[in-house]
Amino acid sequence: MRLNQYFLRHWRMGLLVAFLLIAGTVLNTAYTITLGNILTALGHRSASGTLMWLVATAIVLTLFSLQHYLEPVAETAVNEAMGLSVRRDITARLARTSAEQFHQQPVPEYVSWLTNDLSTINDYGFENTWMAAGQALQVVIGGAALLHYNWSLTVLVLALSLLMLLVPHFFTTNCQIKCNFLPR
């Protein structure tokens, strides 16, 4: 089976993790915004505005702390459920093989499928998918926050991001041509 089929099979648990990822990203962005508003209120010498934004920051940090605790717990639970599904699928597939087919592979190979390979699927499949989803959410929600302040900030960030992607490639290409004396 493909990796996405396990996410679909456990969509309810995955939906909770996705909600917690979204909540964490929104709260992280809200924290930054509330800090900026504290500085703005201080600049305007507004004691009531500063106090209001300090309270808002405390609320955001409390919610963020709760999310920061719950998200790994939920992610671990869904990863374990998906890992168990992978094990069951492998075991069911092995149960359907004939004795002749079974003995075409050494027994340690089957043990590896159920232990090492499953650990690799968990580490580089499930966990990396959640990490990539969280990072994509940070880009989208952070971009929306910048867009809220001023559209030119969004354009500037996109241009600088493109520059950050292109500059290392330029040096890598030139180094391969001009730096032949470096060990590879």
Image: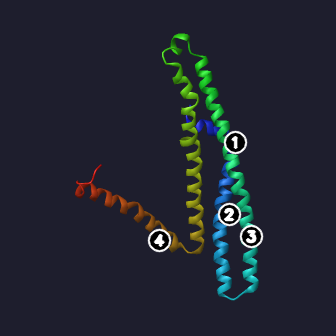
Q: Provide the secondary structure element on which disc 2 rests.
A: helix
Q: Amino acid at mark 4?
A: Leu
**Residue occupying image coordinates x 75% and y 68%:** 59
Mark sitting earlier along the chain (2/1): 2
Residue 67 placement (x, y as % from top left): 71, 57
For discs 3 and 2, the disc positioned in front in the rendered view? 3
Q: Amino acid at mark 1?
A: Ala
Residue 112 placement (x, y as % from top left): 54, 28
Tell me the distance, in whole angstroms, between the alpha carbons under discs 2 and 1: 23 Å
Q: Provide the secondary structure element on which disc 3 rests.
A: helix
Tell me the distance, in whole angstroms, between the alpha carbons under discs 4 and 2: 24 Å
Residue count near mark 2 (Cα–Cα under 10 Å), binned few <14, some 14–19, many ≥20? many
| Residue where numbered disc 2 is placed | 27
Tell me the distance, in whole angstroms, between the alpha carbons under discs 4 and 3: 31 Å
Mark sitting earlier along the chain (4/1): 1
For discs 4 and 3, the disc positioned in front in the rendered view? 3
Vertical placement of residue 104 versus 159, above or below: above
| Residue where numbered disc 1 is placed | 77
Residue 138: quarter of image: bottom right
| Residue where numbered disc 3 is placed | 58
Tell me the distance, in whole angstroms, between the alpha carbons under discs 4 and 1: 40 Å
Residue 6 placement (x, y as % from top left): 62, 36
**Residue occupying image coordinates x 62% and y 40%:** 7
